Amino acid sequence: MKIMISGGTGLIGKALYKAWLDQGHEVIILSRSRTKLRAKETHPHVHVVSWSELETLPPSCSDVDVVVNLAGETISQRWTVTAKNRIVASRIVPARRLAEWAEQQPRKLPLLINASGSSGYGSSETAVFDEQIPLAGQDFLSDVIRQWEAAADAIPAERRVKLRIAPVLSNDGGVFPLMTLPYKLGFGGKIGSGRQPFSWIHIDDMVRLIDYAVQEPSLSGPVNASAPNAVTNDEFGRKLGAVYRRPHWFPAPAWALKLALGEMSMLILEGQHVYPAAALNAGFTFRYGELDEALRALRDE
């Protein structure tokens, strides 16, 4: 199978293309840092191309079976006006470029898997959000997610999966190293009220779910990429402290987070319980369905 990944240098993209190479697939990586990635990746089944080369791909990169679009600048930064513009453009522009490319192909793209976010449902301490519930968030990030999914809908494809990704737990990057740091320093504790839900997914299950979406034709449309058992922020901290044998005692007040992070603090002070109904109904099984299991696996790596 020939698979194209945009955003292949990010946390999920790196884990994904390595897994697919192990399975014997041919991988095309669309990247802004073409030279840097090529120096690191010399596998014979990897083709690294820049976005400027997308319209003139060599014959070896034709007849793509799957496109996985993960492109997007990190949201873990202070949301200034300039940063917001970059966050939006880094998602919408690649999707539009892929739409233009797909329209020029001799056959319709069999499968598009496009990244999205789980926070678009909005914040609630009590509601449980599956894929049947519309995206109703009224904040900046929810608006980004709606634009992102609309741009994905414009990419011609026989089947389209929109992955609404929860925070990914991995030792190699993302939010998890930042969340464990206070505990390693001995100052772990709840953030804000501690009641805000925290949905999550282990990196191994993230990769397995994307691979499952490639193989399972019944998966289509929005798919919540989240473990089935969300926890509160306070529960997450207590479980993290127990697994790493570090204290959970030093609360971080909401005002301090708002002062330090500005509008972006909502990612930490608010949350939603996201339930992966589509994946479970399609037969996917989570290797790490419980947070304790995921944390122990990460600790023991």
Image (cartoon, rainbow, N blue to C red):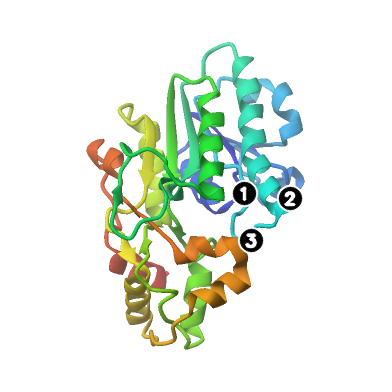
Q: Which mark is residue 77?
A: 3
Mark 2 = which residue?
A: 36
Tell me what residue is drawn at x 49 percent, y 21 percent. Answer: 157
The Cα atoms of the two marked residues, 1 and 2, are separated by 10 Å
Task: Please say if the residues under marks 1 and 2 sit with CB atoms less than 8 Å apart.
Answer: yes
Image position of 252 with respect to 292: above or below: below
Q: Amino acid at mark 3?
A: Gln
Q: Is residue 228 left or right of residue 19?
A: left
Which of the pair 90/105 is nearer the observer? 90
Q: Amino acid type of disc 2?
A: Lys
Of badges 1 and 3, the one in the foreground is 3
Classed neighbour count for the residue bearing mark 2: other residues with Cα under 10 Å, few (<14), some (14–19), many (≥20)? few
Assign a secondary structure to mark 3: loop
Badge 2 or badge 3: first in the primary sequence: 2
Residue 9 is labelled as 1
The residues bearing labels 1 and 3 have C-alpha atoms spaced at a distance of 19 Å
